[in-house]
Image (cartoon, grey):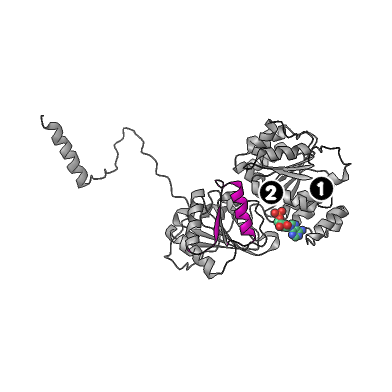
Amino acid sequence: MSFDQLNLSPPLLQAINELGYTQPTPVQEQAIPVVLAGKDILAGAQTGTGKTAGFALPILELLYRQPLPKKPRPIRALILTPTRELASQVHESFTLYGKHLPIFADVIFGGVSINMQIKRLHRGTDILVATPGRLLDLMQQKKVDISQVQYFVLDEADRMLDMGFIRDIRKVIAALSKQRQNLLFSATYSQEIKTLSAQILNNPVDVAVAKQNSTADKITQSIYPIKQENKRELLSWLIGNGNWQQVLVFVRTKHGADRLCKQLMKDGIRCAALHGNKSQNARNRALRDFKDNSITALVATDIAARGLDIDQLPHVVNFDLPQVAEDYVHRIGRTGRAGAEGEAISLVTPEEGHLLGAIENLLKKQLPRVADTGYEAVELHLKKPPKVKPSTHNNKPSNKRRRPRSNKQNVKTANRQIQKRTPK
Ligand code: AMP
């Protein structure tokens, strides 16, 4: 199929052509006609499949087909995204695809001055891309009116729920007009997503291009069983030995990201950390430096797991495995985007074995282990060790043997007893 067959207007086709897109991706092929036909969709598209254009192109087309509203333009399309990075990328996509159209897109998110956003909103915009927190803030201050929204997109809905945005989402929906078209995109389908879609969507058309909870086929995945203390050295070796130019490294904590980044720098690897404690400016700078290859490694917490669109990112490393198995899919989805090849390596300690077990359960396949990591071999147990139950106090005599006191303790107790007994 070609873009010409999708009933898009010439200015949109021109922009697509200038971007070098030759044919629609499967999610675009399926979603664009459905959105143009005015139907709600529930799209299970994995990251990197071109899903942004899957909703941005038909929304731009539908807005373009309407008469131009008077100024200030009312917001006619609202896109909610979980992270600031994703919001700014989605906004960028709308701007690129709509560059030959008389349609405007704006973006608002937290962490930056609200006053500038208020000023811009005052001028009016056709499309607004927003993160839930800042949008609600502006709604409460009555600086933004979303009552005329006709097209509502929940992007990466599963991530929104993971991040605890459900109440914010409900408040936003309550302020929308009932007469609207809804598009919900989610990389994974949990029960919560199904419940949410049942509440928001009207007779949605299912657009499922990827298998549920699957990873892109073009990503080579491997597991390095290793002890925690050897992880950093192995990572530096992988980067140096493989002559990697660009690697996104995921860690569990913000502090862990800063620490690993410092250690990598000591190993001579240009590096930046990206996490929620960094200012928006620092986050933008880190991302820019990573995208233009000024640094080799970007060490990030899961904030970066979604939405980052880095052209041809070749390597993703899970320095720590994610606590939630679905996050594995999102993390490694940063590579192998739009059909390119990618490599995802996970460094796994015995303590993380159960997290790997959960990931393999989700993916319904075993990931290949690297037999010789160059370090002491460790065994991974995929089941969580059973929790030791606290002893219950009942009258039954315990058949557990008491731990014998150490000799030191015996001496201490004996001394105390002697002191007690000795009259003053
Ligand atoms: P997304 O999944 O929306 O984040 O898109 C992933 C990447 O695919 C982005 O860099 C897009 O610019 C690119 N892309 C989207 N649609 C196409 C297409 N039809 N042909 C080639 N690249 C595309």
Is there any visible trace of residue 321 in the rendered image?
yes
> Which stretch is magenta?
267-295
Name the quadrant of the C terminus. top left
Find numbered disc 1 in the image and state the secondary structure of the residue it sits on: helix
Q: Is residue 292 magenta-colored?
A: yes
Picture quarter containing residue 379? bottom left
Mark 1 Cα within 10 Å, few/some/many (few <14, many 20+)?
Answer: many
Name the quadrant of the N terminus. bottom right
Q: Is residue 348 magenta-colored?
A: no
Mark 2 Cα within 10 Å, few/some/many (few <14, many 20+)?
Answer: many
Q: Which residue is mark 1?
A: 60
Ligand 1 shown in quarter: bottom right
Q: Which residue is mark 2?
A: 88
Decide which of tag 2 and tag 1 comes sooner along the chain.
Answer: 1
CA gap between label 2 and label 1 equals 17 Å
* 282 or 399: nearer the viewer: 282
Determine whether 216 is above or below 147 in the image: below
